[in-house]
Amino acid sequence: MVVYAGQGDARRSMALLWRHGAEPTEHPTPGPKPELSVDLVVDTAVAVADEDGMAALSMRAVGERLGRSAMSLYTYVASKNELVDLMYDHAFAELADAVERETDQPWRAATTAWAEHLWRFSLRHPWTLQVSHARPVLGPHEYRVFESLALVLHRAGLGPSDIRNAFGSLFNLVRGLVRTSAEARQAQAATGMAEDEWWYARSSQLEEVAPDFDTRFPTLTAMARDGAFANDDEDEPYLEQEAWQTLRFGLEALLDGIERRLAPTGHTRRD
Amino acid sequence: MVVYAGQGDARRSMALLWRHGAEPTEHPTPGPKPELSVDLVVDTAVAVADEDGMAALSMRAVGERLGRSAMSLYTYVASKNELVDLMYDHAFAELADAVERETDQPWRAATTAWAEHLWRFSLRHPWTLQVSHARPVLGPHEYRVFESLALVLHRAGLGPSDIRNAFGSLFNLVRGLVRTSAEARQAQAATGMAEDEWWYARSSQLEEVAPDFDTRFPTLTAMARDGAFANDDEDEPYLEQEAWQTLRFGLEALLDGIERRLAPTGHTRRD
DNA sequence: GATGAACTCCTTATGCGGTAAAGTACTGAC
DNA sequence: GTCAGTACTTTACCGCATAAGGAGTTCATC
């Protein structure tokens, strides 16, 4: 399920996101008092998504937790899409709080901390990885996360366009890799099959079905022989381990590359 | 929609993926001759997904194109999940063919070409971005794509674990960034609203709803003033431009970082 | 040439999903 | 008391994957 943000009434959604015009009550209005609130609906929806995944997030499921029908939620949010937008930015507040505390460190440490916070945040709220960036939510907390890293990179001496590029590269590197980790967990929960069990079944089939694997894929075979795909820690699922190690590597490499772009001194790069 | 691979019968799926035991007919079997084939179903499904997106990929839609009912497809594939696995690896053959042709170039050029092929491939088949890696498909063409880059990096002098890490970093960087591009196109098609139109509506709301934006986000405001978010080419949607520029930046930075990790003797060896 | 097994494909039904439409009950203003 | 506006419910529609069972087709065998 991929969710496109910002389909609903822009004015309404943005006002909710930025809590604009949220004054309690000017005139008491006729009719029954609302027993729920937007915040309560959003909180509950986040709880559903955290616990059971984005696929299990339905208006019915949220309503059920609140002891209401699915339709009653439409009193508070215009559509499921708008609800997801609100959930996304609401969750990002947590990440924003964490990364804002790291901005005083040296730029490499601060950037690494930023990436690690994003990683852990994504594992806590894996459903955020399924919200499309094609129509950015443009909520305040998403901007705070951007601003935090931009500030760090700006202080380090990176130019405006490079800050934008570095942010995008880091964000997508983390997001892509943590997605594998998160999906591995979700797959296990959804299918009831542990990763090693699944892998065992598949790889034994692979040998049977591709007896010429080592001649078709000599480099991969050599890598496997040299332990490139070994499970270092039996307690942790292999895919999560691999994804984390890949992040460590990619992050360091990327930071090295960014560092070269800080100082205007020195040699020109060759192609 | 996120699809977990490998739920079906492992033996059956793997045999289909690797075309194992696909001999035409040993003994003619009783019963009507199948009028379709696995390949035809997979081709048709890929066409549906290419044209209308993963969300529009339903057994009904595929059946309809073939003049059959949805249920008739279950004669050829065990489930929709298995169909997606087959689609994924089938599509990857195209990418594998392309990248295998680039392996003779110097490592930086070959790696850049690999990333660009992956980029263009993902835009041609954006639905591949929605197939989860938690339960890798393990098809032959996916392995060919891996082997191609592994070979290039091995020749450049990178060690086995670093090859794995570099592959993962590059793959996820490209995949994450191209996803934004692909989703921008899909969002436009799905919502009927052009990106600039959407952006205009939202950003005018943003000013209204967050009048203190520039004091809350000084770095971002300064970046915008310096043109970090300017649209260089009015003909191309901004998000696609930005994603591409970010890839250029991230790829160069990553390659710089990888270059530092090459074996000291590391000179490109031929064959 | 009839029979039964194996096979393809169909119709039907179940249980999910978002949400449109219309109805009910409550609350405050007049 | 009446009316309007609101919160919430029930019902309904359409689309999804796929389970279950049935109908029609073709072969090996008798």
Image (spheres, coloured by chain):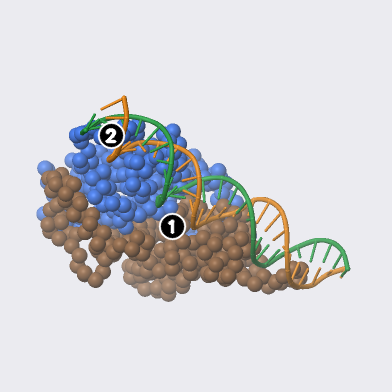
Chain colours: A brown, B blue, C orange, D green
Marks 2,1: beta carbons within 8 A: no
Q: Is residue A218 left or right of residue B254?
A: left
Residue positioned 30% across, 46% down in the render: B115
Among the 4 quarters of the image, the one containing residue B105: top left
Q: Nearer the viewer, residue A111 or A18?
A: A18
Q: Nearer the viewer, residue A201 or B167?
A: A201
Q: Chain of mark 2?
A: B
Q: Is residue A156 left or right of residue A269?
A: right
Specify whether disc 2 shares its chain with disc 1: no
Residue positioned 55% across, 50% down in the render: B199
Q: Nearer the viewer, residue B109 or B20?
A: B20
**Location of residue D11 in the rendering, given as x and y in whole percent from the top left corner:** 64, 55
Residue B94 visible in the current orientation: yes
Q: Is residue B223 left or right of residue B94?
A: right
The type of residue carrying mark 1 is Gln
**Location of residue A158 in the rendering, given as x and y in whole percent from the top left corner:** 38, 60
Marking on residue A130 = 1
Q: Which residue is mark 2?
A: B30
Is B163 situated above or below B72? Answer: below
Among the 4 quarters of the image, the one containing residue A76: bottom right
The type of residue carrying mark 2 is Pro
Residue positioned 55% across, 67% down in the render: A64
Q: Chain of mark 1?
A: A
Mark 2 burial class by Cα count in 10 Å: few <14, some 14-19, many 20+: few
**Location of residue A154 in the rendering, given as x and y in whole percent from the top left corner:** 41, 63
Secondary structure of residue under mark 1: helix
Among the 4 quarters of the image, the one containing residue A230: bottom left
